[in-house]
Image: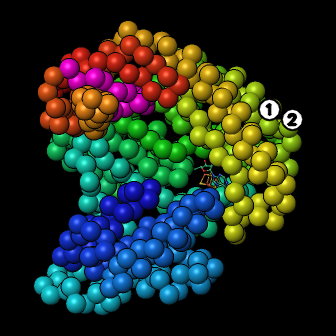
Amino acid sequence: MNHVDAEIISYTLSERNYKPAKDCAKANLIVVVTCGVRNSAEERIVSWTQKLKTQSKNSVIVLTGCLSHREDIKTRLHETVDLFIPIENWMARKDEIFSLTHNVGAGLKPAPTGEKNCFYQILPQRASTFQAYIPIMTGCNNFCSYCVVPYARGREKSRSPESIINEAEQLVKKGCKELYLLGQNVNSYQGKDKNNRIWNFARLLKNINGIAGNFWIRFISSHPKDITEKFIETYANCRKVSSNLHLPIQSGSNKILGLMNRKYTRENYLDIISKIRRRYPQAVLSTDIIVGFPGETDKDFRDSLDIVKKVGFEMLFSLKYSSRPETAAQKMKDSVPPAIKIARQRKLDQVWKKIALAKNKRFLGQEIKILVDRIKTKTDNHGKITRYVQGKSFENKDIQGLIKSGKGNDLIGKWATVKISETTAVALRGELARVKKNI
Ligand code: 5AD
Ligand code: SF4
């Protein structure tokens, strides 16, 4: 979401004739889009912004995103940042920036009318022509006890289905091949159409899948409580929708899930997974797990390891619990010592990587289709340069393919296939086999 926020901000600035600076130090204006999900991100942003100020003394610095409403952050950065603008107020308050940077402003275009409070209706200034992030909803009503999102982004708001479908159609028409539908909880999408009828996520997905063209659809993130039979049916049926479902479980212990206010048990989660597997055996499942939540015992952690094995996740983001201001869990004692959190994270990574390594072997010898998103070069000790195409497969696997001849720069944004000869837990490698407009 932060990425797309930055692309939308960039568009609103370009409308006022601001141009991207080549070098931060020479920019008149720097907008810092912040994340406050974990303390480590917050500390990085605070020190990075302070460093930025010393390098770019004459720049106006604006801070937005998760941290922009926090009084403690405003105090820490009051000498560094000129304006704090929460994302939800961006459209209403962005003119304050224009007056601070008035020295840039000759020839400013007038502000478009009727745009207030419609941040996610603004078309982002996209960095890529072949991959696009489309926000479909923002905010969250779930209040998981550890999470800042409901405080940082407010309640759930969905865009209208027409505006999303129209945006997707335009992108595909222009040759975009990978659409990422984004939201804190895409499965609780509730967009109203022009007849005031509410669409659910399954219906939106089906309609985007119906757009003519050769493209893939990915979506993040989903909450287990919102996975319906209708959604499973749509996910299984829609051939353009990636087979990877990212379904954060957060913990395998019912006691911890209760304390986290996740509104499901491990049994509910396993039940959803067996429904998915029955209907769609090729589904590739990934998840997030927090280790060291307040009160997590060895037994609770073993329940997390156990569910990882039972589900067979092929990708897992393990996160050490970080106490966050404003959240309910902040009032609980952060009882698990840092060394134990590190040890549990290591163990969890060992377990899921072993599963992923074994599962990835099924791709050996296969020719896998990817969308090339960059070219990687490696130079050996004798100065010999080897080039690889990189990209993701339909299943969301990271793939690398050796380029036997040519530099490959013209392959970026194209479909290609890679013949897989080597697999690890996190990547599949081989030789670039075919490049075509339509594979
Ligand atoms: N501490 C650690 N991890 C967190 N996440 C959210 N809040 C916290 C926190 N306070 C993780 C969750 C979520 C992912 C985006 O970040 O696992 O799914
Ligand atoms: Fe945060 Fe996701 Fe829970 Fe919402 S559902 S509070 S975004 S972890």
Left/right of residue 363 with respect to residue 380 in the rendered view: right
Inspect the image, locate mark 2, and give the three-letter code of the amino acid beneath it.
Lys
Q: Residues within 10 Å of mark 2 (few under 14, many from 20)?
A: few
392 in magenta: yes
Q: Residues within 10 Å of mark 1 (few under 14, many from 20)?
A: some
Give residue 316's position: percent from left, percent from top. Answer: 59, 35
| Residue located 57% across and 16% down the image | 358
| Residue located 41% across and 74% down the image | 52
In this figure, which colouring scheme has been used for the structure? rainbow
Q: Quadrant of residue 247?
A: top right
Q: What range of the chain is rendered magenta?
A: 390-404
Q: Secondary structure at mark 1?
A: helix
Residue 132 sits above or below residue 151 on the image: above
Whole-angstrom CA distance, mark 1 to mark 2, is 6 Å
Residue 68 sits above or below residue 351 on the image: below
Give residue 12's position: percent from left, percent from top. Answer: 28, 71
**Label 1–label 2 contact, CB within 8 A:** yes
Judging by the rendered image, the residue that carries numbered circle 1 is 303
Dominant SS type (magenta)? strand
Residue 315 visible to the viewer: yes
Q: Which mark is residue 299?
A: 2
Give residue 86's position: percent from left, percent from top. Answer: 48, 75
Q: Work out whether residue 281 or residue 253 is closer to the camera in this orientation and state it.
A: 253
Work out which residue is located at the far top of the displayed protein and give it: 365
| Residue located 54% across and 37% down the image | 246
Left/right of residue 10 with respect to residue 308 in the rendered view: left
Q: Which mark is residue 422?
A: none
Q: Work out whether residue 421 or residue 366 is closer to the camera in this orientation and state it.
A: 421
